[in-house]
Amino acid sequence: MTQHHTPGYQALVCTHFGSWRDLEIRRLERPVLQSGQVRIRVRHAGVGFAVGLFVSGKYQRKPPLPFTPGTEASGEIIECSPDVTHLQPGQRVVAALDWGAFAQETVIMADTVYPVPDALDLRLAAALPITYGTAWGALIGRARLQAGETLLVHGASGALGMAAVQIGRLAGARVIATASTEAKRDAALANGAHHVLPAEATTLAAAVKQLTGHTGIDVVFDPVGGDLFDASLRCLAIEARILIIGFAAGRIPETPSNLLLLKNASLIGYNYGQYIGWGLVDERRRYAGVLQPMLARMLTAFAIKQMPPPLTQHFDFSDWIQALDTTLSRRAIGKVVLDI
Ligand SMILES: NC(=O)c1ccc[n+]([C@@H]2O[C@H](COP(=O)([O-])OP(=O)(O)OC[C@H]3O[C@@H](n4cnc5c(N)ncnc54)[C@H](OP(=O)(O)O)[C@@H]3O)[C@@H](O)[C@H]2O)c1
């Protein structure tokens, strides 16, 4: 008897903006590759906090409906368009996507596809391209974190926070981490933080003073915002840099500029999306020359065990509801990854 294979692949699909619980797994047809694109067999996909915003249509960019969410994937290249010559079918890669990672296959511009060293497990690599790219680019590229400086990381058991703690350690900084529960603080300590503090705005300044004396914090990495951001402004060292990364707490804070003046401090906004084609103008090609070596350096640091493996929590593709629920209900410790 002849075996008939259904063409296409399975993907989690958003048909209308609304609750992420309305997503459904469907079979999609393979699109034809366009110039500059590669097709990847997805093995693992990172789940980010922004997926809820994406699916509800509240993110700064709205994909055309229907679409498949997911912005980080690891896997092997199936096919390259003829003008992509630096990548080959069969190659193990990790990618930062516009959307489309929660699927068995995805198509993506080659600019944001990064070769994975042999010694690095694809299960771990899926946690890296945007999460660690953001933390690395912000701390090293923009804040110019130096060995011996003191780094304060908020949301330290979350995906970005975990990355910031590890990169801070690698850079030789003294890392103070905040998190809301004891289990999360234990995870931050196990991940390499030198000190942990409760994510409590009312006690932060006094606790930091106890740890640093009158010196204060040189670099703040803040993916949380709200009251913790306000409190951080009262913990600063002279010439401090405050990285504004996200507002997981829900409130976008305002800054009394006198506090910056008094400490010769700088506020630095950092939007990784700008470098991977998510800006008003698509500039992924312009920045590929900066990001490709940065990601290569970072992936190598994991491959040669200069950094401990990222903490990941894995879910089967069929358990996507539990995976998204864990991420969006503040329960995740480390990076949630879907095994496709
Ligand atoms: N700037 C960029 O380029 C960039 C890139 C990626 C992501 N982001 C943004 O950065 C933020 C963090 O992303 P992530 O992937 O690290 O998320 P995550 O893994 O969910 O971690 C966020 C952390 O924020 C803290 N938090 C405080 N209030 C919260 C609330 N009401 N709900 C949920 N979490 C809360 C939680 O720590 P505690 O429980 O310890 O307080 C949690 O661990 C998000 O807003 C995301 O959109 C920005």
Image (cartoon, grey):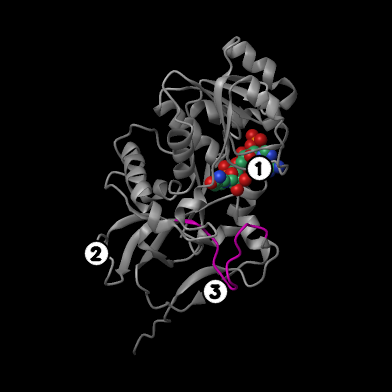
**Among numbered discs 2 and 3, the one appearing first in the sequence:** 3
**Among numbered discs 3 and 1, the one appearing first in the sequence:** 3
**In the rendering, which numbered label is found on residue 199?**
none
Is 3 placed above or below 33 here? below
Taking depth in this image into account, of 214 and 2 the one nearest to the observer is 214
> Seen in the image, is 281 located left or right of residue 332?
left
Secondary structure of the residue carrying tag 3 is strand
- Asked whether mark 3 and ligand 1 are closer than 8 Å, the reply comes as no
Of badges 2 and 3, nearer the viewer stands: 2
Q: Name the residue under label 3.
A: 26
Which percent across, then down, holds residue 179? 63, 30
Secondary structure of the residue carrying tag 2 is loop
What's the amino acid at mark 1?
Answer: Phe
Is residue 314 something one can see in this rendering? no
Q: Mark 2 points at which residue?
A: 85
**Among numbered discs 1 and 2, the one appearing first in the sequence:** 2
Answer with the quarter of the image where residue 18 lies. Answer: bottom right
Taking depth in this image into account, of 170 and 111 the one nearest to the observer is 111
What's the amino acid at mark 3?
Answer: Arg
**In the rendering, which numbered label is found on residue 247?**
1
> Seen in the image, is 67 located left or right of residue 259?
left
Residue at point 39% right, 64% down? 109
Q: Is residue 71 magenta?
A: yes
Is 333 placed above or below 321 here? above
Which percent across, then down, holds residue 173? 45, 22
Boundaries of the magenta span = 58-72
